Image (spheres, rainbow, N blue to C red):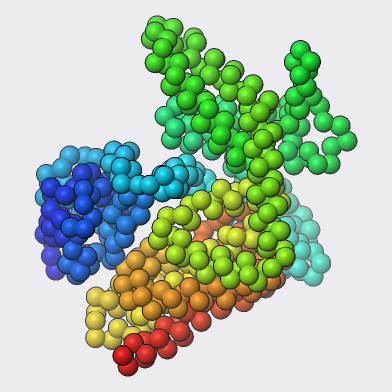
Amino acid sequence: MATNKQSAQQIVEAVGGKDNIAAATHCVTRLRFALKDEGKVDKEKLENIDIVKGSFSTNGQFQVVIGQGLVDKVYREMKEAAGIGESSKEETKSAAAENLNPLQRGIKTLADIFIPILPAIVTAGLLMGINNIMTAPDIFFDDKSFVEVYTNWADLASIINLIANTAFVFLPGLIGWSAVNRFGGSPLLGIVLGLMLVHPDLLNAWGYGAAEEVPKWNLFGLEIEKVGYQGQVLPVLCASYVLAKIEIFLRKRIPDAFQLLTVAPIALLITGFLSFIAIGPITFTIGSWITNGVVGIFDAVPALGGLIYGGLYAPLVITGMHHTFLAVDLQLIGSIGGTFLWPMVALSNIAQGSAAFAMMVLSKGNEKLKGLAFTSSVSAWLGVTEPAMFGVNLRFKYPFFAAIIGSAIAGIFITINGVKASSIGVGGLPAFFSIFAENWGAFFIGMGIALVVPFVLTLAFSKFKKAE
């Protein structure tokens, strides 16, 4: 077994040598490279290194899956082996962005905005799941919820619900912080902007449709509706971009001595007026069109929607385009109170794990593959699919296709049965916490499909592979 130092040196050589590395950093499980020429990567040599569980290229970055904990140690050795300094994630992203086309840059921007706020959203999803278990009828008792039978638990459920809902009630604040930071402005101003859009003096967006009379401001004859944007994504995204650009413009032109008293007030004032006069109403309408369009497709032909999204989610992960659907999920949760897309993501995770587990059964003479397949399948069943997808299934191809088929069938089933999640949560087997309790039966059957079908198909496809 090679030492971490030897493995790091081997990785550097396999990615084309230190001269081919423009920048490098790491995340929880992966080394992330911005390479000058990805054509110089020797993938076969790279994936034969003991500690490497897989590799892939996305958003202009070449990523090597190592595993939690170990990746930190390998990165430290690799810096010395490659003779590179400590690269920040932003430097690596900037170096990688030079290789992206406009579509990829757009997808990367959305990923950069939504990934930092995911821990808050996932945590909220788990807590909402706990609240749902306590307050939904017919789980523990017929026609009654747990808190209706044991009333002394009701206030605990209420507190849990308040904590869980906070991330969604103030979602524009989270998005404003992340988006303004991504666009180069001050994150604190982004928080203020986001909270401004959900200020309690505004008519709550969730009550807009039922309101008998919408309050208005009258600005010298111009009437502006006093409406908040709770649960909305597009208004704060666009307003954050405007805010950041105004702030950058002002900072370049106002002397340092006056910036504290002028930049933030002017930027927020202009962005606030634009948000309520134009940005908010226009993007709210566009968001409603998107929501109605997606809901309409799944209502009209649910089986087709489940087939396409359930089957295509894993390929979208390869391209990085799956990050764009985070915004759609959040828009659906804010607009209709739940998302029918995210449950299919959870089943896709399970399907990838099942296909990898089948490869463990098949890899009798290959101990490295057997160990990798087992650990990556467990990881996928718990919601982290990268080791299974990139380390096992894509390497052999047919397990990946088996997982896609299983995920598509499961997607069709749960979509036909109207399964929805109250929030984005942890993927894989624990995902049921985020599913509405009344949908558990259908979702558990979908889980069974995602567990069994990819496993069986991988075993079957392997026989055809051997026969070739």
Q: Tell me: residue 56, above or below residue 245.
A: below
Q: Tell me: residue 325, above or below residue 177.
A: below
Q: Quadrant of the N terminus?
A: bottom left
Q: Position of residue 265 (x, y in %)?
A: 54, 15
Q: Tell me: residue 102, above or below residue 244.
A: below
Q: Position of residue 127 (x, y in %)?
A: 60, 52
> At x 41% / y 83%, what residue is drawn?
458
Question: Residue 119 versus residue 60: which sits nearer the camera?
Answer: 60
> At x 62% / y 43%, what residue is drawn?
168
Residue at far right of view: 212
Q: Is residue 233 left or right of residue 417?
A: left
Q: Position of residue 216 (x, y in %)?
A: 79, 24
Q: Quadrant of the C terminus?
A: bottom left
Residue 230 appears in which quarter of the rendering?
A: top right
Q: Is residue 201 left or right of residue 113?
A: right
Q: Is residue 197 visible?
A: no
Residue 212 appears in which quarter of the rendering?
A: top right
Q: Is residue 61 left or right of residue 456?
A: left
Q: Position of residue 202 (x, y in %)?
A: 73, 29
Residue at far bottom of view: 467
> At x 69% / y 45%, what residue is drawn?
288
